[in-house]
Image (tube, rainbow, N blue to C red):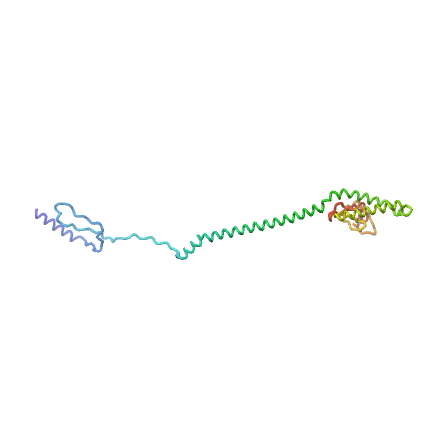
């Protein structure tokens, strides 16, 4: 029995001498093999086995490039500044209110001007319908005066002269009153006017050697203007030599 144990010890020592030496710098925390629990080798210390590869530490991922702390803080302060944000919103609101105010003022002034024109037109042409109805009476009064021959207005016909003078005075007072309200009568032939289609209505044309073409030489019925607007065009005869 003793001889067998000695032989085993000798063989174990020879095997350990042939195995490679493990560097002493390897940390002792690595795992090692425990000795066999056999009763025959309980008094023999078994050799420890270490890994021959050096321990590697995991590589850290490269740190992301970061900007300067001062610039980052300034940018975040600008972006997240509630006072500046509120100030921008108020400035925008002020511009919108100013634009609405200017538009409202312009619309109000346009409305004032339009109302003023409408009131002036209503005042100027309020008697237009009444003036049209009155024109016929003025025409009849004018015809009555023109039908009396001038050779009959002599002292022997004193009653006719008095009547004619009374009608003439009535016509003058009536025309002055109508003129105060903007109604005026015009005679194109008396003023020797050129034919104007806006104021005249040509009823016939005839040659007149001593007059130019387009000249009004006869007035069939006189025209009327109400505040510069033609209320009734004058019916006239026009010269046409060609």
Please give left or right for residue 9 compared with residue 161 in the image.
left
Foreground residue among 218 and 184: 184
Foreground residue among 239 and 113: 113
From this viewpoint, which residue is outermost toward the right? Answer: 156
- Residue 72 appears at what percent x and percent y? 41, 55
> How many numbered discs?
0
Foreground residue among 63 and 134: 134
Please give left or right for residue 109 compared with residue 85 in the image.
right
- Residue 182 appears at what percent x and percent y? 74, 48
Please give left or right for residue 106 compared with residue 50 in the image.
right
- Residue 209 appears at what percent x and percent y? 83, 51
- Residue 135 appears at what percent x and percent y? 78, 44
From this viewpoint, which residue is outermost toward the left? Answer: 2
Foreground residue among 77 and 48: 77
Please give left or right for residue 169 compared with residue 7 in the image.
right
């Amino acid at each position: 029995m003793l001889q067998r144990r000695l032989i085993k010890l000798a063989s174990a020592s020879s095997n350990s001498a042939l195995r490679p030496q493990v560097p002493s710098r390897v940390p002792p925390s690595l795992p090692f093999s425990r000795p066999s629990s056999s009763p025959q080798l309980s008094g023999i210390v078994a050799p420890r086995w270490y890994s021959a590869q050096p321990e590697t530490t995991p590589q850290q991922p490269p740190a992301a490039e970061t900007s300067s702390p001062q610039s980052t803080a300034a940018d975040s302060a600008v972006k997240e500044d509630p006072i500046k944000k509120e100030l921008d919103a108020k400035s925008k609101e002020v511009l919108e209110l100013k634009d609405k105010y200017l538009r409202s003022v312009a619309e109000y002034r346009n409305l004032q001007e339009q109302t003023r024109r409408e009131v002036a037109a209503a005042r100027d042409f309020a008697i237009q319908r009444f003036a049209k109805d009155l024109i016929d009476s003025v025409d009849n009064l004018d015809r009555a005066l023109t039908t009396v021959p001038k050779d009959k207005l002599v002292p022997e016909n004193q009653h006719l002269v008095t009547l004619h003078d009374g009608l003439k005075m009535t016509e003058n007072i009536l025309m002055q009153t109508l003129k105060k309200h903007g109604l005026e009568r015009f005679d194109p032939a008396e003023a020797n006017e050129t034919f104007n289609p806006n104021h005249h209505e040509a009823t016939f044309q005839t040659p007149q050697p001593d007059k130019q073409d387009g000249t009004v030489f006869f007035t069939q019925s006189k025209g009327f203007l109400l505040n510069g607007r033609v209320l009734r065009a004058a019916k006239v005869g026009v010269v046409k030599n060609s």
